[in-house]
Image (cartoon, rainbow, N blue to C red):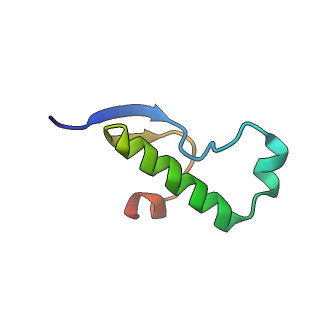
Amino acid sequence: MPGMIDAHDHMATTSRDGMRRVSTPPSLFVLEVAESMRATLRAGFTTIRDMGGLDLGFKFA
């Protein structure tokens, strides 16, 4: 079976706490997004349209 498609996701939203978002080091942010992407893939989604503003590097990864 082909993977599921999510046409609207915000992969960069790792926390709803605004203060935590602005104080999180970039390296930690990248690792948190990678874990979120891994969990999404394990859930069966193979195509994601990110609406949260991730840069092209995440697509290449």
Tell me what residue is drawn at x 70 percent, y 41 percent: 15
Q: Position of residue 2 (x, y in %)?
A: 18, 37
Residue 2 as seen in the image, left or right of residue 13: left
Quarter of the image for the C terminus: give it.
Answer: bottom left
Q: Is residue 1 left or right of residue 28?
A: left
How far across and down, in percent of the image, does residue 60 sit? 38, 64
Residue 5, relative to residue 20: is it above or below?
above
Position of residue 28 in the picture relative to residue 24 (left or right)? left
Task: Identify which residue is drawn at 36% across, 44% down.
Answer: 42
Front-lying residue, 17 or 42:
42
Q: Residue at the left extreme?
A: 1
User: Where is residue 28 drawn, in percent x and y?
Assistant: 66, 62
Residue drawn at 42 percent across, 42 percent down = 40
Identified at 31% across, 34% down, the residue is 5
Residue furthest bottom in the image: 27
Q: How many dots with numbers?
A: 0
- Residue 51 left/right relative to 45: right
Q: Position of residue 19 (x, y in %)?
A: 85, 46
